[in-house]
């Protein structure tokens, strides 16, 4: 008899149910990872104009903001952490930050990974807004 059959015949088994819950949680986590991966790859496959670039200082500053805002050091940032770091000074700015956060957050965990923050939140948002952060190069 397998451990599964033994567990089912024994009735309630804390280990069985905890293991099942952990497996379901891992599956949900994997689905979120797959969703983020697809969204990031879709964004990275977008064609940018050939006459733009981002300065390394702009990229460094944006990436540094992620690590500065990750106050609990879990490798993700929440909207609360982002607001604590960037400190929106009025309701309009907060609402815009909230909307941008929601657009970049594709996994459903209410947190941004570095990939979501940079690829979707920076590159994707700038592309949708006409490359305002990018520099134009004369060809």
Image (spheres, grey):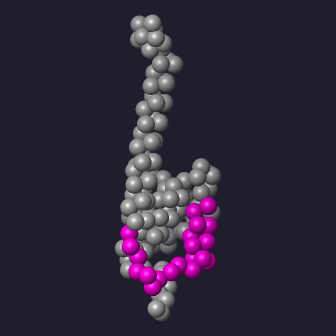
Q: Quadrant of residue 12?
A: top left
Residue 98 appears anywhere in the view:
no
User: Is 131 situated above or below 12?
Assistant: below
Judged left or right of residue 61, residue 7 is: left
Q: Nearer the viewer, residue 106 or 37?
A: 37
Q: Residue at x 45, y 42 (%)?
A: 30
**Image x and y of residue 6, in percent:** 45, 8
Judged left or right of residue 129, residue 116 is: right
> Per the image, is 115 magenta?
no
**Image x and y of residue 66, in percent:** 57, 63
Judged left or right of residue 8, residue 68 is: right
Residue 139 appears anywhere in the view:
yes
Q: Residue at x 50, y 65 (%)?
A: 118
Instruction: Count all numbered tags in the image, as a single digit.
Output: 0
Farthest bottom residue in view: 138
Q: Quadrant of the N terminus?
A: top left
**Image x and y of residue 48, in percent:** 41, 76
What's drawn in magenta, residue-wise?
A: 46-67
Q: Residue at x 50, y 85 (%)?
A: 135
> Per the image, is 49 magenta?
yes
Q: Residue at x 61, y 77 (%)?
A: 57
Q: Nearer the viewer, residue 99 or 103?
A: 103
**Image x and y of residue 134, in percent:** 48, 81
User: Is 122 situated above or below 8?
Assistant: below
């Amino acid at each position: 008899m397998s451990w599964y059959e033994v567990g089912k015949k024994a009735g309630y088994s804390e280990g069985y149910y905890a293991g099942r819950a952990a497996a379901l949680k891992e599956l949900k986590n994997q689905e979120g990872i797959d969703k983020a991966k697809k969204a990031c790859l879709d964004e990275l496959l977008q064609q940018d104009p050939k006459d733009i670039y981002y300065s390394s200082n702009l990229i460094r500053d944006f990436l540094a903001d992620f690590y500065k805002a990750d106050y609990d050091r879990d490798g993700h940032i929440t909207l609360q952490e982002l607001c604590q770091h960037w400190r929106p000074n009025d309701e309009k700015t907060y609402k815009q930050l909230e909307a941008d956060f929601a657009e970049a957050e594709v996994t459903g965990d209410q947190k941004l990974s570095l990939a979501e923050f940079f690829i979707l939140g920076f590159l994707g948002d700038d592309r949708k807004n006409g490359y305002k952060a990018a520099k134009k190069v004369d060809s």
